[in-house]
Image (cartoon, coloured by chain):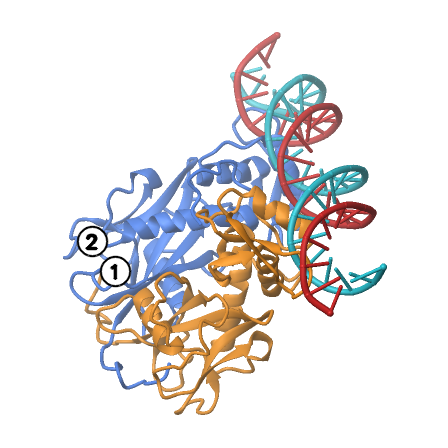
Chain colours: A orange, B blue, C cyan, D red
Amino acid sequence: MQGYDKYAHEPFAVTVDLAVLTLREGALHVLLVERGQEPYRGHWALPGGFLHPDESAERAARRELAEETGLADVSGLHLEQLRTYSEPDRDPRMRVVSVAFAALLPDPPEPHGGSDAAEARWVPYDKAGPLAFDHDRILADAHERVGAKFEYTCLATAFCPPEFTLGELQQVYETVWGTALDRPNFRRKVLATPGFVEAVPGAARLTGGRGKPAAVYRAGTATALYPPLLRPSREGRPA
Amino acid sequence: MQGYDKYAHEPFAVTVDLAVLTLREGALHVLLVERGQEPYRGHWALPGGFLHPDESAERAARRELAEETGLADVSGLHLEQLRTYSEPDRDPRMRVVSVAFAALLPDPPEPHGGSDAAEARWVPYDKAGPLAFDHDRILADAHERVGAKFEYTCLATAFCPPEFTLGELQQVYETVWGTALDRPNFRRKVLATPGFVEAVPGAARLTGGRGKPAAVYRAGTATALYPPLLRPSREGRPA
DNA sequence: GCAAAAGTGTTTTTCTTACACCCATGC
DNA sequence: GCATGGGTGTAAGAAAAACACTTTTGC
């Protein structure tokens, strides 16, 4: 941090990139925008943009998220800084350092209409083809991070609407992890963690058209999950 | 990522800040430098510096680490990106976005002599008084991150020299977590995880002057630790 | 009645925890 | 001998995993 003047005149552009994840019809989706200019014109990319002079990366991410999704109320949504991508050649035109975030939304908040000219769209995670820049890696990192945090935090409720059933919460886990979970054990685990969910007294909802109506819950106040709820598959888990 | 020109002329300075941690005489230490100029002249701060035009934040962090510690071989050392601090007012003079890293060294690699003019010194973690800028927070975040990663990765060996005993490895855990662990259980856990440590065949070392010589181990190839080795205290654990 | 989804119970196994105890060394 | 640190054994408890079974709804 000493030697301010030395390289102070080698400025960098600083951007945020957003991996906005949601669940639609039981599948993980990501918000992508189609690039309207070079480089990568016509390719899909993660939404994002430059930091304004007076805002932090977190604020910039929230602003971009609001702009891209058309949502005015993004205050309560989960936004998590992933890491910063700074390879010198990650943008062919100029030196761009990008602070990446993962954002979690309950269901499609709206089909969204971005304020930017470029088209934006929810795309199934698996079909989010080759993206522009290093966005494939950012997206993969976001998925991995979210999956890992599901193990030891109550983050999964961020994918759920204000009121949800345990079956829906379990589907969130199963979709993000890509594995099936045992329902009885999942129930017990969630209910045994104080503050993970809290029951909505009278409510009950019919989920699949058939079957017994399910009890309705709200997200609790707890953030940590102890003991953790570990993913079944050990293979291919990064450090 | 669209709209390159919009704010492209509001450049930011980009720096790296390093929370370099090591264990000396059973206590966690952090590498600090004394600032030779305003602001915070005379205060202690985390080492760091500006990104060069052609290097990534990771490379810059490694370069600064080598410069500050006087170590030529910092290639194998553990360097982990923490997060990026970008509050607009974090530096009173100009807009500086800083990518923070945590670095783990086995013992003092040397008393180190920095190439920079400012004095650098190992300081006990607890006595790392109020630091310049937001470095107190960065340091606390680094400690928390390292402690958390000890639970589910084999990271602790990064604090150990190439050859170490299980008692020494246990001390690493105890020092970073600030809690005592049960020796028999710790042993079993470590040895039950394939690839965490591997025995050095003939070797044995006398650790405390007295007592039975301990078997010597090397770091294994595994990175993940499954099942995890969870910290005993659940209180005050962040999300 | 049947299928589908929610919810309960139980058993087995695995992991954690808390100890008691033995071994090898320096003094 | 005895203090010190390394290493082994074991039994109780907690948690995870597997799976059988009941309940309530729509058709």
Left of B194 or right of it: where is B37? left
Q: Position of residue B9 (x, y in %)?
A: 23, 81
| Amino acid on which disc 2 is placed | Arg
A82 and C21: which is toward the camera: A82
Pick the quarter of the image with the N terminus of chain B: bottom left
In this picture, is B101 found above or below B228? below
Residue at the spot 29% in from the left edge and 76% down from the top edge: A12
The chain that hosts pointer 2 is B
In this picture, is B29 found above or below A131? above
Rendered image quadrant of residue B81: bottom left
Q: Is residue B109 visible?
A: no
B176 and B41: which is toward the camera: B176
| Amino acid on which disc 1 is placed | Met
The chain that hosts pointer 1 is A
Q: Position of residue B194 (x, y in %)?
A: 68, 49
Q: Is residue A168 visible?
A: yes
In this picture, is A230 found above or below B75? above
Rendered image quadrant of residue B237: top left
Left of A70 or right of it: where is B135? left
Left of A14 or right of it: where is D17? right
Judging by the rendered image, the residue that carries numbered circle 2 is: B35
Report how far apart the C-alphas of labels 1 and 2 lie in the structure.
8 Å
Q: Secondary structure at mark 2?
A: loop
Residue at the spot 59% in from the left edge and 38% down from the top edge: B166
- Are the residues tagged 1 and 2 within 8 Å (C-beta)? yes
Judging by the rendered image, the residue that carries numbered circle 1 is: A1
Rendered image quadrant of residue B16: bottom left
**Category of crowding for the residue at label 2, using alpha-carbon neighbours closer than 10 angstroms: few (below 14), some (14–19), many (at least 20):** many
Residue at the spot 34% in from the left edge and 79% down from the top edge: A95
A199 and B162: which is toward the camera: A199
